[in-house]
Image (spheres, coloured by chain):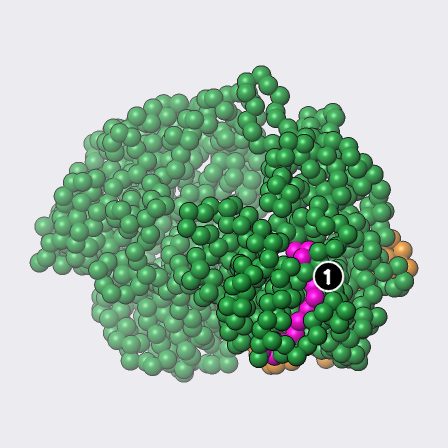
Chain colours: A orange, B green
Amino acid sequence: MLTFTCPYCGVTACEAELSPGGEAHLKRFGPGSTDEQFEDYLFLRPNVKGVHFERWRHAMGCGKWFLAARDTATLEVFGTYKAQTTEPPADIVAAIRAKRPDWSLT
Amino acid sequence: MSTRLSTGGRLIDRSRKIAFTFNGKRLTGHPGDTLASALLASGQTIMGRSFKYHRPRGVVASGAEEPNALVNLGQGKTHEPNQRATTTELFDGLTATSQNHWPSLEWDIGEVNALLPRFLPAGFYYKTFIHPRAFWKHVFEPFIRQSAGLGKAPDPKQTDPDRYEHFYAHTDVVIAGGGIAGLQAALEAGRAGAKVILCEQTAHWGGRAPVDGVEIDGKPAEDWINDTVQVLEGMENVHLRLRTMVAGVYDHGYILAYERVADHAPAADTPRHRLWRIRTARVIAATGALERPLSFPGNDKPGVMLASAMRDYITNWGVSPGDRTVVVTNNDDAYRTALAIKAAGLDVPCIVDAREEADGPLVQEARARGIRVLTGMGIANVKGLRGVVAVQLCRQAGEGAVVEDIVCDAVAMSGGWSPVVHLWSHCGGKLTWDKAGAFFRPDHDRPPTDQTGEGFVVCAGAADGALHATDCLSNASTSARNMLVSMGKPAPEAEVAKATAAHEAPLAPIWVMPQGAGPKKRSKMWLDFQNDVKVSDVQLAAREGYESVEHTKRYTTLGMATDQGKLSNINGLAVLADALGEDIPRVGTTTFRPPYTPISMGAIAGEARGEIFQPLRRTPLHDWHVDHNAYMEPVGHWRRAYCYPQKGESHRDAVNREIDATRGGLGLLDASTLGKIIVKGPDAGRFMDMLYTNMMSSLKPGKCRYGLMCSENGFLMDDGVVARIDEDTFLCHTTTGGADRIHAHMEDWLQCEWWDWKVYTANVTEQWAQIGVVGPKSRAVLEKLGTDMDLSNAALPFMGWTAGKVGGFDMRIFRIAFAGELSFEVSVPASQGRALWDALHEAGQEFGVTAYGTEAMHVMRAEKGFIMIGDETDGTVIPQDLGLDWAISKKKEDYLGKRAQERSHMTDPTRWKLVGLETLDGSVIPDGSYAVAEGVNANGQGMTQGRVTSTYYSPTLKRGIAMGLVLNGPDRMGEVIEFNTTKKPAKGETPKTVKAKIVSPVFYDPEGEKQNV
């Protein structure tokens, strides 16, 4: 039962009021893309052990989707942020680097 | 034979007697007894039968770790199987029966299994599954089925009369375990001002210290315990809870605790069990340690007991497990048992110590009391069938040649202690092997971490490996203080009480006794008492290639019983490590999973049962349906009327009547559950074009259009009619079950992909009551009520909508038709729904108005060949499979699912496609039938060429109709194919099939003349 703080309403919510949405920051490929691009977009997930950016919806709360940076092995949450971005914001990246000096956003 | 001693028993009240029954026999005990202590006091040493071999078993432990003494508790409605006698507090009128035996506990026919262990070796199940095939079905399965299972399952027809509840709590610190370590930790945390919940699984504070003769600050431990509990009770920030077991530690400090509120007082007006759902910043696991059995031949016989349990029975409950007890050990602690037995005036013929030397203070004291101490020795055999009559001694270092017989009626064994690291491990804490103590203890460098990355569980006292009382208190204090600093609540300076107990010399790790025992002896050394796993089984598994401890566990069933290997785990993996020639830490442990001990299903369910099992959604017309004898069916959280049977009608009769009435005159459907989502904003049209496969932006205000929604994976996920309210606003109707999901889907794309589009959505499903007014008389009834709208076909044609007044109600009217008749879906604010429904019924009398339910709706849509999400679709079906190409825009560059539908598998011409099916004999094809094809596949199964998706009796056509997906179906019109049926063929006959002709899926009014009037 993970807990995240919703960056919209500020509520610290547990999984009972959240619904998961898989990996964050996927670039959508639609018509005109190659089979490889589309497969990669729709199915291929690195399933990392370590720092992971992921989507959550505060489904039983304010209803907003938000993004979280979390370590899948230690369950540490480096931060949550609004979903309207294509990459993690600088403060989140800094928070991760502070705890995981070897980590880089590839 | 076990009996009640004339004195002693710190937990019992000898002044009172309470009565209970065991297997129908009337027995008595004292308040404070457990069922196990009371049974032992009554001379009942056999308490159960083992799982596989039905061996007679006595109690081996005194607490939660007990593997043998499992009983059926209660009768009738309160019957509950597999209850541990050791954790069942005795109460007046308790009834218990023993388990897993036939015909009686004392004489069990299945005991013959014990003579055949050669045929029930490790991996028995897996082996018999495979070879020889016929044996499984005719020999093994009937045999196993008869002997499988321990307790008797509760009667499914009886309802548990007890009450259960959930409690929610938020706190700083949860402390699991109310022994001296837990109490000390609570003192520190309490003084630091932290909010503390201290849970103890038994009914008493203090744990083992009083039994083990520990002194604290020069006084008996009990004094310090009482004082400390009093201090803690005075702290407002500390909450103490007895009979509460911390069952599991989960992510980010989520804790489940199980409180047995009224198990000891069944008549009390309280819930029986309470499940605590706690969020905490930190957990202190002061869970103590469990004693390990020793693996010697015959160690499972009734009368063989853990040394610590034996002194518990003597000291806590004044019960003598036997008159002459042999103590067998590899450590000093078990000498305390010998001394306790002596002090109770009973005999200890000898202490068998596997160590070559033993000379600690406790050993010296035992010698001084005149007890014979034999070092370097082991037990070669335990004599006796249903109890102990003697033990045969041998050299520990040898192969088991008997050097002496000792007459005795009980054996106390100790193989050392293992810290209870379960709670540390539940959420990922790692362990390290302590060579000196021969146990796993928490690896402080690798704790389970919380959302901040900090460790949030610490172990305190024996659970941290500080087994000796002297270290236990100071360890608990230090562990708690360090933890409090880490959470920014340092504890004030305070002196830690000093615990003292006799010094103990190191133990010798002994995993098999005697060390060089041959196969015959090893097959009598039990590791897992409940599941009957022996040393020989683990060794066999290793020989057969099971190197991983997790695989060995599953192959042998070691540790898979209800006690989850509390006694057998370390011994088993030590034996495995030895067989593999590996170090114990390299072999590692199996995973510790919650709950620590079984918790009741009632506690898990809490209040969520019966009427309030889950929230129900009721439409504004719900009461009318109930009043009119509707048969209600669940659709998501909604309850919908399936049909309205009249007196003497079957459901089928009712459905047919409702359809005839609707097609012949006027039917009314409560369609309020239909999803209604508003999509609004300057970019709403653009967004709608991405959501739906067809063009929605071109829809004119005042018009409706049927649309399909696909997932990004191309599969059809929902359908419904969209009405354009105005330039900026669309009203999307979704399926009943899909409303919330589709709304979430819309929000996902709006918030996460196209966040710059100016669109809002709102799920207004519950704001509107919606009624389908259906049938040739539908226009007439609306006009009769009086309206300011022109409802003629010219002014409001099919797939148009308008708003105005009917019978004084403000409403929207949609000319949409799921039944294929002239029909109007009318929509009013939810509060007006019932009044409108009543008005329609009143006005509709002359037209034969009939309410119809969901089944009639389903049949009528099938007659029209309309698809139903969930019938024609199953998550693998694309619109193209259903002949819905007309609803897929060729013009649009993009929509959700478009790219996916271009994949080779989606464009494969051999995908099964939707057709109608008409049985030649007019019967109804069974639901779920497949169309059979020639030949067999690689597994010898018959080939298929299609399947039925919807199948009904059509009262309109007076025959069975069906829709299905069939290979090249649309190109095979008129062809007859065969579907399998569930009819069992007579012997020698081929399975029955039903012949059906491939036809158009539109069975009724293909030109739409009925709806377009």
Instruction: Please state the horizontal and vertical placement of residue B242, each as a whole percent of the image.
Output: 30, 65
**Where, quadrant-wise, is the C terminus of chain B in this rendering?**
bottom right
Q: Say if B866 sits above or below B606 in the image.
A: above
Instruction: Please state the horizontal and vertical placement of residue B316, each as a whole percent of the image.
Output: 21, 55
Q: Quadrant of residue B547?
A: top right
Q: Quadrant of residue A97?
A: bottom right
The front one of B630 and B217 is B630
Q: Residue B819 magenta-drawn?
A: yes
| Disc 1 element | loop
Q: Say if B217 sits above or below B211 in the image.
A: below
The front one of B730 and B553 is B730
In this rendering, would B710 be left or right of B291?
A: right
**Where, quadrant-wise, is the N terminus of chain B in this rendering?**
top left
How many numbered circles does the render carry? 1
Residue ID for mark 1: B1013
Q: Which residues are magenta?
A: B809-821
The front one of B98 and A106 is B98
Instruction: Please state the horizontal and vertical placement of residue B28, each as a whole percent of the image.
Output: 13, 48
Q: In percent of the image, x 72 and y 50: which residue is there?
A: B1005
Crowdedness of circle 1 by 10 Å Cα count: few (<14), some, many (20+)? Answer: some
Q: Quadrant of residue B104?
A: top left
In this rendering, would B792 be left or right of B436?
A: right
Q: In percent of the image, x 11 and y 54: which residue is there?
A: B17
> Visible in this render: residue B978?
yes
The amino acid type of the residue labelled 1 equals Val
Please state the chain letter of the residue tagged with numbered disc 1 in the rendered image. B
Q: In percent of the image, x 46 and y 81: which residue is there?
A: B490
Instruction: Please state the horizontal and vertical placement of residue B323, each as a whole percent of the image.
Output: 16, 40
